[in-house]
Amino acid sequence: MHRLVYLCDWLPPDFGAVGQYSLLFARERAAGGEDVVLAGLSATATSVEEERPGSGRLRIVRLRAPAYDRANLRGRALWTARTNLSLVWTLRREIRRADEVLFTGSPPFLIHLLGPLNLLLRRRLTYRITDFHPECLMAERAAQGHSSPSEAALRFFHRWTVALRRRVDRFEVLGEDQRERLLEIGIDPERIVLKRDPSPVEIPPGTAPLEPPAELAGRAILLYSGNFGVAHDHETFVAGYRRHHREGSGRVVFWLNATGARADRVAAALQAEDLPFHRSLPVSLELLPRLLVTPDVHLVTLRDEFVGYVLPSKIYGCLQSGRNLLYIGSPRSDLHLLASRDLPSGRYRRVDVGDAAGVARALEEIAAEKARQTRDSAVP
C-alpha cells in the first residue's frame, strides 16, 4: 500500500481554502487504496482522527497553532518557522516511513525543511504549489515601493528556493499561469502536472439564495466573498465604484463578505466616501452555496504583480454559482482563462487594473441588465 504524508495549513473547521482542498484530495487518495496521513493546523486543539474511505486509510492530524498578525513581517517569519518545524517534527516517523511526501504552498517555506531533509531520506517529493513564496513577498514589497539592503538578502533567498525546487520530483499547479512561472525558472515540463481545485461546495440546481441585507434588497448586488488579501487589487474597484455612484446611476450596491489585509481598507475607503455597502464576515461552509447564488454579480480581483504566483480559489465557487462575474485583473491570469471558458461573453466582464472608468462602465452595464430583468419579471 502506497504511504503518503500530506502537509498543509488550516484544516476544517478552521477557515482556509488550502486545507479544505487538501482534505478533499487526501480523502480521494485514501479512497483509491493509499495509506494517507494528512497533517495541518487547528486554532483550537491538537487532535488525531481516522477515517476509512474506500480501500485505504486516512489519518488526520491537527496541530494547535496560534493566530498571528499578517501585517507584522517579523512575526509572520517567526510563526512560519515554528509552525513548519512543529509539523515536520510531529510527522517525522510518518515521513521516514512514507513513499511520498506531498506539501502545499501553505504554510510557506516548507520546502526549506523538506528539501534538505530529503537529501537523506530520498522520498518522492510532490509540491502542490498553491502560492509561490518568496515571490509573493517580493511582489508585495515591490507593489509597496520597498527598496533597502534587505532586498539583496531576499533575492539570495529566492535563488536558494529555486535551487531547492529543482530537486522536487513532481509539481501540481493550479493553472497554466503557474506552469509558466515554473518553466521560467527552469523546471522540467515533464515534472509539472495541472491539477485544478474544484469548487469548495456543491451548488445543486434550485439552491435557495440567502435573504439579502435590507439595505441591498431590490438593487443589483455585487458580492466579494472570502479573503481580500495583499494579492487582490482594491484601489481600482473603489475608484470605479465611486464614479458609478458620483457620476453614474448608482444602482449597483456592494456586499463585502470578507476578511483579509485589504478588506478593512476597502470598508474604510467606502465609509470615508459615504458610498453604500454592507460588510459581513464569511459564512460557514453549510451556508456558502446559498450565499454564492444570492448576488447578481461576483467580484474577483488580482494585482498584476501576482499573476501566476496566486490563483484566488474563490473563482471556482463563483463560476459554479451561475452568476455573472466582474474580474479586475490581467488577461494573463488563469482567472481570465477560466471565466472566458466557463461563462458566456455577456455574463463575464474583465477590466484592467487601474482602469477605474472601465469599472464604472461595467457597473452601469450590470445595473442596466438588472433593470431589464426586473421589467421582464413584472410583465404578466
Image (cartoon, rainbow, N blue to C red):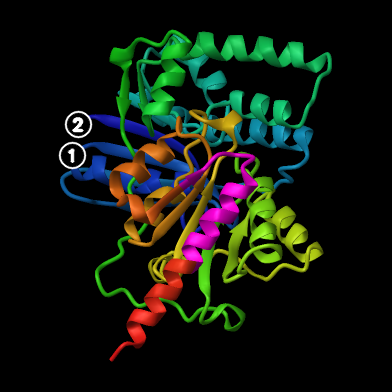
Figure quadrant of residue 288: bottom left
User: In this picture, which residue range is highlighted in magenta?
Assistant: 350-367
Q: Position of residue 22 (x, y in %)?
A: 39, 43
Q: Quadrant of the N terminus?
A: top left
Residue at 38% of width from left, 12% of height from top?
122
Q: Earlier in the sequence, mark 1 or mark 2?
A: 2
Residue at 78% of width from left, 63% of height from top?
273
Residue at the far right: name it.
148
Figure quadrant of residue 290: bottom left
Mark 1, other Cα within 10 Å: few <14 / some 14–19 / many ≥20:
some
Tell me whether circle 1 and circle 2 mark residues in contact (CB < 8 Å).
yes
Check if residue 225 falls in the magenta segment.
Answer: no
Specify the label residue 33 is tagged with: 1
Q: Is residue 27 left or right of residue 33?
A: right
Q: Residue 288 or 7: which is nearer the viewer? A: 288
Label 1, label 2: how far apart the Cα atoms are: 7 Å
Residue at 67% of width from left, 24% of height from top?
138
Q: Which residue is mark 2?
A: 1
**SS of the residue under disc 1:** loop
Label 1 is placed on what type of residue? Gly
